[in-house]
Amino acid sequence: MHPNPIYHDADAARNLAFAREVGFGVLAVNGQAAPMLSHVPFLLSDDGVFAELHLVRSNPIARALKVPLSASIAISGPHGYISPDWYGIDDQVPTWNYVAVHLSGQLELRPQDELRDLLDRQSGHFENLLSPKPPWTTDKMTPDVMDKMMRQIVPCRMKITGVDGTWKLNQNKTDEVRLRAADGVKANDLGVNTDALSMHMRTAK
């Protein structure tokens, strides 16, 4: 996360809303040799207190969860390269604009009998976003096949104790300069979801 406080002006509600909308991030837990990382979809509780997810039973993080562990989930949003030429002012250097939210807290295994409900709620959340397509549900699975697959994964929950977001959108520039850079982002598409990044840059304060 960029340390400049000008990029950390979003409140917890906005950061949680962003994390909830994306619903996918990199789960990180300390390991002996290096951090253990896993890319996971997750659900946030309505009050933003818990993130729920599941892991393959053989995942090193799942194996390490004999006791609750400190963990973080990093959620990346739109990001892109910023050419200094787009500013229209002298003595500028290249940078990278981005939106990212970090959730931190205590990760724990949950009882296996909570897994089916978690899977139903996870799939339901994302399937509803595909409306008007009729939603896929776990009831469409052959019971024996579903039971076999469920034995291979474990439910987890992280109690969220910290929320931090970086919205690095050239807030350190004047409105005129920032809007010119936003035009450059939209026109050149060097990054990920640069239309959204350009929009965020236009509305930044």
Image (cartoon, rainbow, N blue to C red):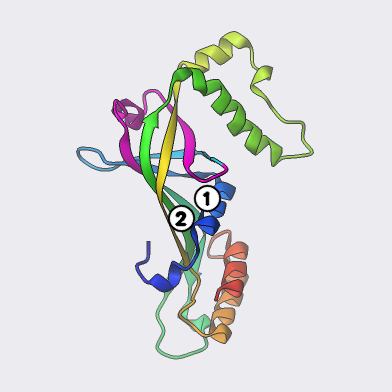
- Residue drawn at 20 percent across, 40 percent down: 33
Residue most extreme to the top: 144
Residue count near mark 1 (Cα–Cα under 10 Å), binned few <14, some 14–19, many ≥20: many
Q: Between disc 1 and disc 2, whose residue precedes? A: 1
- Residue 129 is situated, as x and y percent measured from the top left of the image, at 69, 42
Q: Residue 53 magenta-drawn?
A: yes
Q: Residue 176 magenta-drawn?
A: no
The reply to whether discs 1 and 2 touch (Cβ–Cβ < 8 Å) is yes
Circle number at residue 166: none
- Residue 93 is situated, as x and y percent measured from the top left of the image, at 40, 80
Residue most extreme to the bottom: 90
Circle number at residue 19: 1
- Residue drawn at 49 percent across, 57 percent down: 12
Quarter of the picture containing the C terminus is: bottom right
Residue type at mark 2 is Val
- Residue 15 is situated, as x and y percent measured from the top left of the image, at 51, 56
Q: Which residue is mark 2?
A: 101
